Image (spheres, rainbow, N blue to C red):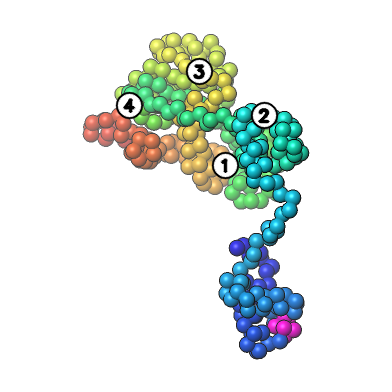
Amino acid sequence: MNIHKNARLTPVRREEMARAVLEGRLSKADAGRAFGVTPKVVARWTARYAALGRTGMIDRSSRPARIPRMTQPTTAERIVALRRKRFTGRHIAREVGVSPATVSRVLRRAGLSRLKDLEPAMPPRRYERERPGDMIHIDIKKLGRFERVGHRITGDRTGQSNSRGVGWEFVHVCIDDASRIAFCRIMPDERRESAVAFLEAALAFYASLGVTVSRVMTDNGSCYRSHEFRNACRKHGLKHVRTQPYRPQTNGKAERFIQTALREWAYAHAYPNSTSRADALPKWLHRYNWHRPHGSIDYKPPISRLALSRDNLLRLHI
């Protein structure tokens, strides 16, 4: 039961009021004044307590006891059965002899308002490459620049228009399919020059860990369809795979990493400005790769999948 903030009586107070009246300590008028309600309310709760005891002090459902014009269960079952045969709403109404509005209500309760709701849910297609470097996923997240703590943190929207027009920054992200080791860099835009520069930086980062990249997956953004990006992939002997249009799930590892980065880095602290947020990215990325347990790899950090020797761990863990 949800008691609203201005409620005069709770179940305990109702019981106290009813017992005071039944035991003769207060009249109904006096009890109404003492508990801040009318004598009619006092009489109702007193009668209910006398008949049902403490259980009668709980609010009852506001649903009517009888609904004479409610659609019969057999009619609702027939409507659902016809829907499963791919009948339209008006066709069902004509067959059953009810109004289209009734059919709509029944189908909404059954979760079958749309014909596509009849289709079985597609099972998730999860895959994982066997070796680190077999495929890296690349994507871009656009974040607004800011010069002061925004209303997302403070809740104060006054003067927020003064920060408009500061601009944008583009977080290019890359994650390895097998190990989940990630690399990020904030670039000035999402054009082809920035995409190629980020690809070069990502390949150098993975090479420093002893990982040779052979495939790269991106979406169908214009920077990834450019001749410059294609030539960069050919230069490094990379097979470029693009996702199916309007199917971001294909690049799901990059999409999921972006969600994690937003939650644990970009929106995790009240940064005074976007420069401070950018300065915190390398530290968070190091924690993600080297220390943060990853749910999809048995709650081990991504770096554990490289099987580095102790010497390499000490050299790389700066």
Query: Can residue 290 be seen in this snapshot?
Result: no
Find the distance from the CA under tag 3 to the CA under tag 1. 35 Å
Q: Nearer the viewer, mark 4 or mark 3?
A: 3
Q: Residues within 10 Å of mark 3 (few under 14, many from 20)?
A: some
Residues at badges 2 and 1 in contact (C-beta under 8 Å)? no
Q: Which residue is mark 1?
A: 273
Find the distance from the CA under tag 2 to the CA under tag 4. 59 Å
Tell me which numbered mark, 3 or 2, is placed earlier along the sequence: 2
Quadrant in the picture for residue 91 = top right
Q: Is residue 118 above or below residue 45?
A: above
Q: Nearer the viewer, mark 2 or mark 1?
A: 2
Tell me which numbered mark, 2 or 4, is placed earlier along the sequence: 2
Q: Which residue is mark 3?
A: 242
Say which amino acid is labelled 4: Leu
Viewport quadrant of the N terminus: bottom right
Of 282 and 101, which appears nearest the observer?
Answer: 101
Q: Nearer the viewer, mark 3 or mark 1?
A: 3
